[in-house]
Structures are given as structure tokens and as C-alpha cells.
């Protein structure tokens, strides 16, 4: 029996509601046995941690996250913490976890489930069969570059600075992740940057081109300006296989790609560190792409699929349980095919359900699939 240690960090807002549904899925797999079991521990993060401890994440929580086989993250943030000190705003808890665990590779798959082809804001023919992988650099760029400050000027005005900064090493390691993934998929990588305006874009393009040499000719590389990439994602998303991009462009492009799948509530992600040379183990945090959705939080309306599918990615990338990960994907596809919809993906003629009904239906489908 392999026991996997999971740290659950529900966070704030709908994170609390979607994590409850992940706990049901964990209970399902624990009841199954099958050579694997999960030991879970939970902690506070984001606004909840700030309220309890005055910080957005505690040192103890970071230490537990480092020791876990995988961290499952809900969402952080909300208007309640609008006046929290900048360094302790809820989002800072997530950023610290990413940085301290060196989770540089954020995999954001945008897959359009067949039953949702009409739920997208794009036409069915544009999204049917869509399967894109956005590889977002997660520990560098303008999110972390120094200086990052607001200074008061002599004239009483202010000057705000964020610093976009990338090194050869940071770009090469994320490019390798993208090329390796492409080899297992459609053998095509688009690298999105703005070398026409930014020095980091010039270096990005240069290093990605160099890294590509050991992957050519089987993996195609296309350079694309990030603004054009944004446009192409809504014009013809199926032209893409893997998109590799920096931290900020990746944040924006992944929310955009989410709409091709029907909703932001559908998009999971895996934030991965480097694999240990000896053991092959890597630190990892699995997080939906969406936030704490203050507009629907506490109402039982949130779509739990992005968080459940993020747990599915944990099975695939951290637990060596790809068969069970496929099972989760099939269960999600199954309940959608049965016509169940949370409000964000609701379509005429379908059955609208809440967060817990959707979670329960996915567990039920899992039970049928293994029967
Ligand atoms: P958001 O992703 O929370 O919500 C955007 C819109 O999508 C809202 O209308 C919301 O109701 C809807 N939505 C999101 N997830 C959904 C789901 N699972 N089911 C149904 N509808 C869903 O983004 P926002 O409103 O810009 O940000 C709110 C807060 O969340 C901010 O504090 C932001 O910093 C934070 N945030 C956190 C994370 C994270 O923790 N990983 C990610 C993004 C935003
Ligand atoms: C995301 C979120 C985060 C980001 C925030 C909450 C720090 O928007 O994971 O996409 O900008 O990376
Ligand atoms: Mn985002």
C-alpha cells in the first residue's frame, strides 16, 4: 500500500466549498483501496490565515507543504481583505508557496469536454475537441522582480515600479518542460512573448530557440507575439497544442483559454518544481485557475470541477495514479454528458445543480465506472 500525504489548503471564498467536494473524491479512493491511500492534513491560507495568524501563510504551513507529496489548493482573496497590508494580502500566501517550493512550471490544460461544446462563448466548431496545454512560468518575471515599490516624488506625486526580469536558466527550464510535454502530445509549441517591446522578450525568444535545438525536428516551434496569441486563442484556438509563456502573459492567456472550455470553473492546474535527480520526486501544488469568486461565495453555486480536476492532476503527476486520474476525467465527462450543470456552464434543457450536488454526482459516477 502506498500512502500519499496531501496538504489541503481550501483558502477563502469558494475555495472552501470546492475543497469539500475534493474531500469526497479522496474518501472514495480511500474506500477503494487498490494499493493507494491518502493521508490528509488541512491548514489555513490567504485571508483565513491572515485573520487567524496575521500572515497570509505561516512558516509552519510552508514547511508542511514542502514535506507533503502534494498540496491541493482552493482559492484565496476577497473584498474582506482589501485593507490588509500589501505583504500580507491573501494572494501573497499563494505567491510565497509558489516561490518557496520553487514551483516554476504551471501546467494549465484547457480541454473542452464534448458535452460542453455549446457552453463556450465561442462557436461549437471552434472549441469541439479542443485540447491545449498552457505552460506558464510561475516563479519569475514581473510577479517577483525587484524593485517592486511605490515611491513618493518631490512634487507629491508617486511612482510605481514593477520589474520584469528573466534569466537564461529560468527560461531554459520552462522551455524544456514545454518541449517534453509537446513530445507526448501534438509535437507543437508556441512560445508567446513580446520581443518587439521587451528585453525579456528578446532573451525569452533567444533561449527558447536555443533550447529547441535538441527537440528539433520532431517538435515544431513557433514564436508568437503575446497579443497576437491572445487574439488567435479566440479566433482559432485549435491551432494550438502547447503554449509556453511567462508568468504574467500566462496568467492572462489561461483565463482567456478557459472560456473556450465553457467556464473558468472548469480549468485545473499543476504547479510543479524540478524533479529530484535521485528520487524523481518533485514538490507540487495543484490549484484551479479561478479565484475565490466573492460574487458567488457561500451560496453553494460554485463549479467544483476545476478543483476536482486539479486533484486528478495530483494523481497523475505526484502519485503515479494516472489510471485513477483518467477515471476522474471520465467521471467528469460522464456527469456533463448526463446533463448536470452548475450555473456557470448552464445551458437550456440541462439540469442545474449546486456545488455539493455536482461533487456527489461525480463520486456516484466514479462508483459506476469502477463497478
Ligand atoms: P475569480 O476567478 O474569483 O472570478 C471571476 C468570475 O468567474 C466571477 O464571476 C466568478 O463568479 C466566476 N467563477 C470563478 N470560478 C468559478 C467557479 N468555480 N464556478 C463558477 N463561477 C466561477 O476572479 P476575480 O473575481 O477577479 O477575483 C476574486 C478574488 O480571487 C481576488 O481576490 C483575486 O486576487 C483572487 N484570485 C485568486 C486566485 C487563486 O487563489 N488561485 C486566482 C484568481 C483570483
Ligand atoms: C492565478 C491567480 C494568481 C496569479 C493570483 C491570485 C496571485 O490569478 O493563479 O491565476 O496572478 O498568479
Ligand atoms: Mn489568474
Image (tube, rainbow, N blue to C red):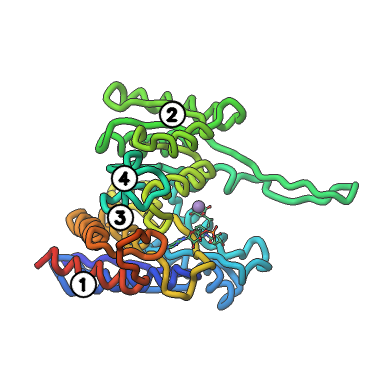
- Secondary structure beneath label 2: helix
The residue carrying mark 1 is 30
Crowding at dot 1, Cα within 10 Å, few <14 / some 14-19 / many 20+, comes out as some
Mark 2 vs 3: CB contact within 8 A: no
Q: Residue at x 57, y 65 (%)?
A: 90
The residue carrying mark 3 is 313
Mark 2 vs 1: CB contact within 8 A: no
- In depth, the one of 230 and 165 nearer the eye is 230
- Secondary structure beneath label 4: loop
Q: Residue at x 31, y 23 (%)?
A: 216
Q: Residue at x 38, y 52 (%)?
A: 262
Label annotation for residue 277: 4
- In depth, the one of 346 and 104 nearer the eye is 346
Question: How far is mark 4 from mark 1, CA to CA?
Answer: 30 Å
Question: Is label 2 or label 3 in front?
Answer: 3
- In depth, the one of 313 and 121 nearer the eye is 121
Question: How far is mark 1 from mark 3, CA to CA?
Answer: 17 Å
Label annotation for residue 208: 2
Amino acid at each position: 500500500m502506498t500512502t500519499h500525504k496531501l496538504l489541503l489548503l481550501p483558502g477563502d471564498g469558494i475555495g472552501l466549498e470546492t475543497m469539500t467536494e475534493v474531500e469526497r473524491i479522496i474518501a472514495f479512493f480511500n474506500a477503494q483501496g487498490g494499493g493507494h491511500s491518502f493521508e490528509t492534513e488541512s491548514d489555513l491560507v490567504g485571508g483565513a490565515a491572515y485573520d487567524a495568524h496575521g500572515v497570509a501563510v505561516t512558516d509552519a504551513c510552508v514547511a508542511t507543504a514542502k514535506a507533503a507529496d502534494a498540496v491541493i489548493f482552493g482559492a484565496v482573496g476577497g473584498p474582506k481583505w482589501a485593507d490588509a497590508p500589501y505583504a500580507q494580502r491573501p494572494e501573497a500566501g499563494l505567491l510565497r508557496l509558489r516561490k518557496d517550493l520553487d514551483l516554476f512550471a504551471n501546467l494549465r490544460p484547457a480541454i473542452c469536454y464534448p458535452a460542453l461544446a455549446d457552453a463556450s462563448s465561442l462557436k461549437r466548431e471552434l472549441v469541439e475537441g479542443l485540447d491545449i496545454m498552457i505552460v506558464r512560468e510561475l516563479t519569475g518575471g514581473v510577479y517577483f522582480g525587484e524593485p517592486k515599490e511605490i515611491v513618493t516624488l518631490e512634487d507629491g506625486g508617486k511612482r510605481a515600479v514593477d520589474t520584469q526580469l528573466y534569466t537564461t536558466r529560468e527560461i531554459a527550464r520552462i522551455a524544456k518542460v514545454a518541449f517534453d510535454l509537446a513530445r507526448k502530445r501534438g509535437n507543437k509549441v508556441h512560445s508567446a512573448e513580446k520581443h518587439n517591446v521587451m528585453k525579456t522578450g528578446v532573451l525569452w525568444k533567444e533561449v527558447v530557440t536555443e533550447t529547441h535545438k535538441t527537440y528539433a525536428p520532431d517538435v515544431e516551434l513557433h514564436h508568437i507575439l503575446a497579443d497576437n496569441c491572445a487574439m488567435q486563442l479566440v479566433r482559432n484556438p485549435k491551432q494550438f497544442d502547447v503554449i509556453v509563456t511567462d508568468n504574467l502573459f500566462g496568467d492572462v492567456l489561461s483565463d482567456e483559454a478557459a472560456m473556450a472550455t465553457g467556464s473558468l470553473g472548469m480549468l485545473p492546474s499543476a504547479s510543479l518544481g524540478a524533479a529530484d535527480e535521485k528520487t524523481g520526486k518533485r514538490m507540487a501544488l495543484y490549484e484551479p485557475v479561478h479565484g475565490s469568486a466573492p460574487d458567488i461565495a457561500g451560496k453553494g453555486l460554485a463549479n467544483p470541477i476545476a478543483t476536482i480536476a486539479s486533484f486528478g492532476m495530483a494523481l497523475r503527476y505526484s502519485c503515479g495514479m494516472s489510471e485513477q486520474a483518467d477515471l476522474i476525467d471520465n467521471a467528469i465527462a460522464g456527469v456533463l454528458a448526463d446533463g448536470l450543470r452548475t450555473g456557470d456552464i448552464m445551458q437550456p434543457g440541462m439540469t442545474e445543480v449546486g456545488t455539493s450536488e455536482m461533487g456527489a454526482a461525480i463520486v456516484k459516477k466514479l462508483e459506476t465506472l469502477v463497478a
